[in-house]
Image (tube, rainbow, N blue to C red):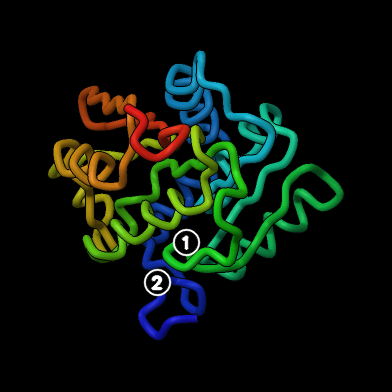
Amino acid sequence: MRADSLWADSVWDVNENHQTLCASPEWAEHLQVDVLAPLLAGVDLGGRMVEVGPGPGAATQWLRSRVEHLVAVEAEQRAAETLAERYAATNVEVLHGDATALRLEDGAFDSAGSFTMLHHVPTVEQQRRLLAEMTRVLRPGGVLVGSDSLATDDRRAFHEGDTYNPVEPAVLLTWLQDLGYRRITVDVEEDALSFVAYRPEAEGDH
């Protein structure tokens, strides 16, 4: 693994309030009902999906009921171990690893997702690398989906002591275009963004 890999051998910088919120049933319900359901309405995730940065798994349960096989890549070892125990003998495979250096084959997945975790990636370069890795493991025609929060004063205060690096929607759109995606949708509502983008079926497709 590269020396500049992101999280694989360390713990995320998240404060206690943040840990409590992300592990709560209320947060899972919000993410599943208010974010995932409208975002993925009409989106075919295919049979195989990779989710990066599942944390306590707020999105994982919802996603796993919509694909045949879900690979969840979690950087924080304790969280990965907890998820692996929770989903033992199910269609979820949990890997402890760095999403900026995925140990997964090229084109192995029909869909890839990242939900409310991009702002935890410390640098712009690592955010771009994470998206590039998710792109690499998508098959031609595969779909990238995700959501994240936007910067606000209240949210910055909530993340005091955390890694907090929100992505601007226009910047995200440019990154997705640079990665070669087509049929890109970036939606902004109040203090959150969501996105759906498709890899071309073949080189040169539009």
The label shown at residue 99 is 1
The residue sitting at the top extreme is 42
Taking the spot 41% from the left edge, 76% from the top edge, the residue there is 5
Q: How many labels does the image show?
A: 2
10 Å crowding of disc 2: few (<14), some (14-19), many (20+): many
> Mark 1 is on which residue type?
Ala
Considering depth in this image, is 35 or 113 the residue closer to the camera?
A: 113
Are dots 1 and 2 in contact, CB under 8 Å?
yes
Where in the figure is residue 180, as x and y percent of width and height? Answer: 31, 42
Viewer-proximal residue, 93 or 116? Answer: 93
- 176 shown above or below 97: above
Indicate which disc residue 7 carries: none
Residue 131 in view? yes
Q: In this view, does 76 lie to the left or right of 123?
A: right
Label 1 to label 2: alpha-carbon separation: 8 Å
Residue 130, x across and y down, in percent: 38, 58
The crowding category of the residue bearing disc 1, from other C-alpha atoms within 10 Å (few below 14, some 14 to 19, many at least 20), is many
Q: Is residue 101 left or right of residue 152?
A: right
Q: Which amino acid does label 2 sit on?
A: Leu
> Quick check: 183 left or right of 85?
left
Q: Locate residue 90: give its quadrant.
A: top right
Helix, strand or loop at disc 2?
Answer: loop
Which residue does the image show at 76% across and 49% down from the upper left?
A: 87
Residue 24 against residue 201 in the figure, above or below? below
Residue at 27% over, 55% down: 159
**What is the x, y in percent for residue 32?**
53, 27
Sequence order check: which comes first, mark 1 or mark 2? 2
From the image, tell me which residue sits under label 2: 6
